[in-house]
Every structure is written in structure tokens, then in C-alpha cells.
Amino acid sequence: MGDISKTWHVLPLTPDRWADLEALFGPRGACGGCWCMTPRLTRAEYERNKGEGNRRALRALVDAGTVPGILGYVYDRPVAWCSLGPREDFSWLARSRLFRPVDDRPVWSIVCLFIDKYHRRQGLSARMLEAACAHAAARGATCVEAYPVEPRGDDMPAVFAHHGLASAYLRAGFTEVARPSPTRPIMRREV
């Protein structure tokens, strides 16, 4: 693919970019009808809305003025997505036994990192994480937190890596602040 530096750019998801997200996610909503709503819903709500219901729910958030994440582009083609926002936006984190708050500090959370299958293993994850930190800082965040996966083997199916890999977060300047399980660190970066 070569150097993408001159063709790479990142933009927030707004109503006028909805078609770009649909193109990136495809008809299955990135992964099994998720449409990046899993972190915002209870398990029952997610299952009830799986697929089209989740797509409509995310679209409603965007249409209401919420910016649930950022899109990464090579040329004008959407190839990457990162969902983030204030921790309290994600009910999944409030219910999680693994990802309890590390302290009482307000943080922005990265809850999804999705790279188009044709653009994986090219350093785009770290680029998206850099852009996510800049996006959060521009909106008043002072700390960004994430919950990546640290695989035990050489390869991990993409479906299990939707939080991103710890190695990409390290390349983007994050440090580990807690490890609630052997393969799931909590990582932070000051912004």
C-alpha cells in the first residue's frame, strides 16, 4: 500500500458522514449487527435491537447531535472507526465487573476500534488512537482510557479484537494502569 501519510485524514461522525460509516460497516454493522451500540445498551436491549434496530439507534444518536466516534479515511474512502466518549455514556462500563473505575477521575473511554479488513496490519490502529486522543482533548477531556485485548497467541480473530490490541495503544502513547484479567489491561493516556 505504501505510505498513506499524505492521503490519511480523520473526521468526526456527523449526519453528513453517515453514508461513510454504512459503507465501512457494511450490511452486518461491522460485527454481527452491533453498529457499535453494544457498549451503550444492556445485553437484552442489544439482542432485541441486533442489526437494523442498532443501526437506527446509532443513527438517532448522530442525528441528535451526538458524535459517537471518528472515521479514518485513506483518500476519501472510510477505512477505520473509533468509538469514544465520556465514560458515563457507556452503560456497559457501569455494569462491568472487569472494568470498574480505576479512580474517581473523569475519563473519556475508547470502546471500539474497527479497521477495514483490507487495511489491517498497516499501523492505522495507532493513528486512529492518536486522532481519538486529539478529538477527546478538543472536547475538554484530560485523560483517555481504553480496555484493549492482549492476545496470548500470535493471531486473534478480528471479532474478538473490537477494543483494539494493547500493542497499538502502547504505540499511541498509552500506559497500563490496571490489569483486571490476564488478557485485558486498562490503559490510559493523558491528553
Image (spheres, rainbow, N blue to C red):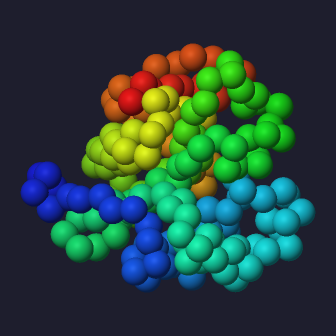
Query: Could you tell me which residue is drawn at 54 percent across and 60 percent down?
Result: 68
The part of the image, by quadrant, that contains residue 9 is: bottom left
Query: Could you tell me which residue is drawn at 76 percent across and 73 percent down?
Result: 50
* Image mark count: 0
Query: Could you tell me which residue is drawn at 77 percent across and 49 percent down?
Result: 91
104 lies left or right of 185: right
Picture coordinates of residue 99 (x, y %)?
Answer: 72, 31
Q: Where 83 sits versus 11, above or below? A: above
Picture coordinates of residue 59 (x, y %)?
Answer: 59, 77
Picture coordinates of residue 32 (x, y %)?
Answer: 67, 69
Image quarter of the C terminus? top left
48 lies left or right of 50: right
Query: Could you tell me which residue is drawn at 61 percent across and 30 percent down?
Result: 106
Q: Where 68 sits versus 94, above or below? A: below
Could you tell me if residue 156 is visible in this image? no
Could you tell me if residue 53 is visible in this image? yes
Image quarter of the N terminus? bottom left
159 lies left or right of 117: right
Closer to us: 187 or 62: 62
The part of the image, by quadrant, that contains residue 148 is: top right
